[in-house]
Amino acid sequence: MGAEADRIARRAGRQGGLAAAGLLAFALGYALANQYQLIHDVVYRLAARDPASAASAFAVLAAQAAGFLTALLWLPRRWAMLLLGLAGVSILVNLGYVGLVRELLTAGTLAWMAAEARQAGNAASEFGGALLLAGAKTVLSVAFFAAARAALLRSRLVPTGRRFAWTGAVLLLLPGLLIRPLDRWPEGAERNLYGLAWELATAAPPPPRSAVTLIPDSAGAPRHIVWLVDESVAAAPFARLVAPMLAELPHSDFGTAAALGHCSAPAQVALRSGVDVRNAAKDMDLRRTPSIWGYAKRAGYRTRLIDGQTTGAPQNLLLAPEAALIDELRPMAGGIDTDRQIATALNKAMKAPGRSFTMVVLRGVHFQYRDHYPAGTIPEDSPVARQYDTALGWSKRGFFDALLAGVDREQVAIVYTSDHGQNLTPGALPHCSQAPVADEFRVPLLAFLPEPLAARYAAAPRAGHSTSQIFPATLGWMGYDRAAVQARYDRDLDAPTARYVWFGRGVIPSGARGEVSVTAGSDFPGS
């Protein structure tokens, strides 16, 4: 009896040890996968002396962990491996995104990521170290989960069998199904990618654009109006490197302006939509405005979008109701000389008869900067600031001369700006950071205008502007009543902005709350 008792005790000890090791491995894997959820929603809440919210968030994560663990144990091996694979993808996206941007993934940011998917290669090259770390953490987390399953099943303390498989599946799905209707957060990193994707997929279709109610008087309006929106061109490097190229080309220089966002998609959505800066708030929906295309068509202009960054579907959250207002969508991506090719095409278009409004998204100098000039131009290990300067110089070399050569300047109005600036501090995220600095918003703003319009801005200040003012200024050039459009949107460019406004990644409302990421005030963004 004594030997048998010892054998049973040793077996029980081994089983208990395996079970404890399995639970510990799972806990480590789950904590690693959800480190940012734990920091943001538990640790920060405790630091803010809000233990109730911290306890609630921890309980929500614990419930999701329990559901994930039971599914991992009770699903058949093949299904469990599929579960690990799907969990790994979601964890990788979370750790990669949050590791770079330092904010949790949301439906709005997921939509932004989808809109910026074309930059995945650039991001992988520029931030390879951080993304490799995220990948390593993901592999380690999934390995902990696999080890936990193996140890707990070997312990034989976990009941198994076909009858448990359905229970495991239900317990896996139940927390995710309850989070949204019960408004309980955070959602675990192993599942939120799919929850947020479902949220986006089942969202209501974008609303129709409002009709233009103003009536233009287009007599004397320029025949061709062009918006040139460059990519990642910061104000100070532009003034130092590109402005001297314009010395012989008459133009109106409005100095450094504030971009409408420090990421491409929100900045361009806001620019195209027009922003009522005096009333900008979280409940605004830029999908409902008439947009620049609606105003241009009402004024008798043929509308055109030229995109120097893509060869496929439109980018920057150009939704179907807005795209329907554009007569010509023209992708023109073509390597490091794309911008000069666009300048040549525009030059020809501005000499053609008829009336046109064209918005151009230039290739510009998005990171990684060394992709925007010929290899060998400078040493490969040059500092990032030198890489940026070289890329900017190459991008705009001869651009404005090619654009304006032989064009009747009295028949065209051209605005040049950038979607956002750049933070060129070594090691910093150049733009789209969680806590943006002013350099991420500082962009150049200038115009090439017919003499009567140029005279209107002769005494305009060279500070205090926002790119939100491009919209009402352009409507005035098209023949719309200046006082009416300034009341609806912002001041014209002959005065400073009425109010600085900028949008984050969540520029489009999503989810039940329907709020957008918008900040407004009297101070320059990021200051």
Image (cartoon, helix red, strand yellow):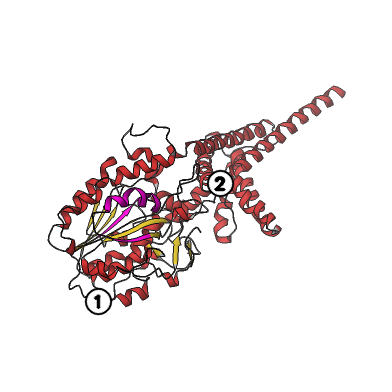
Q: Amino acid at mark 2?
A: Ala
Q: Look at the image and tell me whether residue 123 can be seen.
A: no
Q: Nearer the viewer, residue 448 or 317?
A: 448
Q: CA distance from mark 2 to mark 1?
A: 51 Å
Q: Quadrant of residue 28?
A: top right
Residue pointed to by mark 1: 215
Q: Nearer the viewer, residue 208 or 76?
A: 208
Q: Nearer the viewer, mark 2 or mark 1?
A: 1
Secondary element type, mark 1: loop
Q: Secondary structure at mark 2?
A: loop
Residue shown at 39% from the left, 48% from the top: 116
Q: Earlier in the sequence, mark 2 or mark 1?
A: 2
Q: Residues within 10 Å of mark 1 (few under 14, many from 20)?
A: few
Q: Which residue is mark 2?
A: 189
Residue 484 position in % (x across, y down)? 32, 77
| Residue count near mark 2 (Cα–Cα under 10 Å), binned few <14, some 14–19, many ≥20 | many
Residue 270 belongs to magenta span: no
- Three-letter residue code for mark 1: Ile
Q: Is residue 210 left or right of residue 43?
A: left
* Quarter of the rendering occupied by the N terminus: top right
In front: 63, or 371? Answer: 371
Task: Specify start and end residues of the magenta stretch as a single range.
Answer: 226-255
